[in-house]
Image (cartoon, helix red, strand yellow):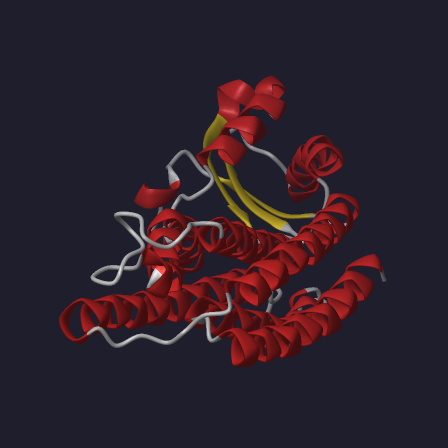
Amino acid sequence: MLESNALKVGQWTMLLLAILGFIAFYFSGAAALSVDALYSLINFASAIVARKVMIASRSAPDHAHPYGKGALENSYVLIRSAIIVGVIGLAFVGAVVSIIEYLIYGDTTEINLGIAGTYGVIAAVILLLLSFNYSRAQRRTPSGVLTAESKATRLDAIMSAATGITFIAVSMIPSGTPISNNSFDIREIADSLLVIVLVLLLISEPWRTIKSEFGRITGSREDPALEAQIRSLLSDHGDVVTDIYAVDRGSIIEIDVRLSYVGAKSVSELDEMRASVVAVLAPALGKTRIHVVFTEREIENFN
């Protein structure tokens, strides 16, 4: 399976980067690299969980789960994003504390900027290639899990690239300038400043993901564009479409369509109408689970 192979590649790539990151941190003393290595280690563990979630979420509906387990994908993406926010949040606090200690006490750890910069650039290239591989697999096999991994890997690549480029640039600052003298040397706190900037720039994406996935799990309308697309596809049924609610689970789209027809209909006729709705939506939207209810009431007014 393409997506399973992509996750396997990602799993071992992240483990390798985590090991290299901790080695680079040990020899360079750059705190930013310890954060990057920890993030890669989390990605390694997440890839293992992701494969199990992917299999479980696509299992056939049963008596205990009559609507399937598609919500597992949304739950995974939510928890994944929450972990990311937690890790970079702790990194932010640590960076602020380091800067305060430097400004008050002058305490700092000597950083080998060359090692730190080289690792950052190499890691960024590897991560960008991995993100591309995830995206390629996701295009061929739509999956919320693969989308989450692709976004997380791209975020990691940005962090690594920024780390590497910044350290290389800072290493070129000569001594004796206004920002590199005996009273204040920006090179001593470059990694902490970098962590703060990266957190402020990158925190918005995982935070938005948390809000949207929590909304999908709790039943909020988080996919209005998808609902508008469905309404457009059902334009031939436009005069009888009462309401539409759709949830993007990643690998499957769950759709609730409410229709109102005038006049008595037999069960077989209603089944034919349901089949006509499925025949229109399924080819256009891919893997779907569609529920058609006949009622004049909108979903929020249906009791």
As drawn, is 56 to the left or to the right of 164? right
Q: Nearer the viewer, residue 124 or 109?
A: 109
Count of marks placed on residues: 0
Position in image of residue 238 (x %, y %): 53, 20
Residue 96 location (% of width, % of height): 25, 66
Which picture quadrant has residue 92?
Answer: bottom left
Q: Residue furthest right?
A: 1
Q: Which residue is painted at 82% across and 64% down in the image?
A: 5
Q: Is residue 61 above or below residue 225?
A: below
The residue positioned 56% from the left and 59% from the top of the image is 117
Residue 287 visible here: yes
Residue furthest left in the image: 104
Which of the 4 image quadrants contains residue 157?
bottom right
What residue is at 37 percent from the left and 76 percent from the top? 109
User: What residue is shown at x 55% (from left), y 32% (from top)?
Assistant: 264
Q: Is residue 64 above or below residue 283?
A: below
Q: Classify 167 as above or below 30.
A: above
Residue 171 point in image, percent of width and height: 48, 55
The N terminus: image quadrant: bottom right
Which of 256 and 36 lies nearest the eye of the viewer? Answer: 36
Name the residue nearer the viewer: 207 or 298. Answer: 207
Residue 59 makes an appearance in the image: no
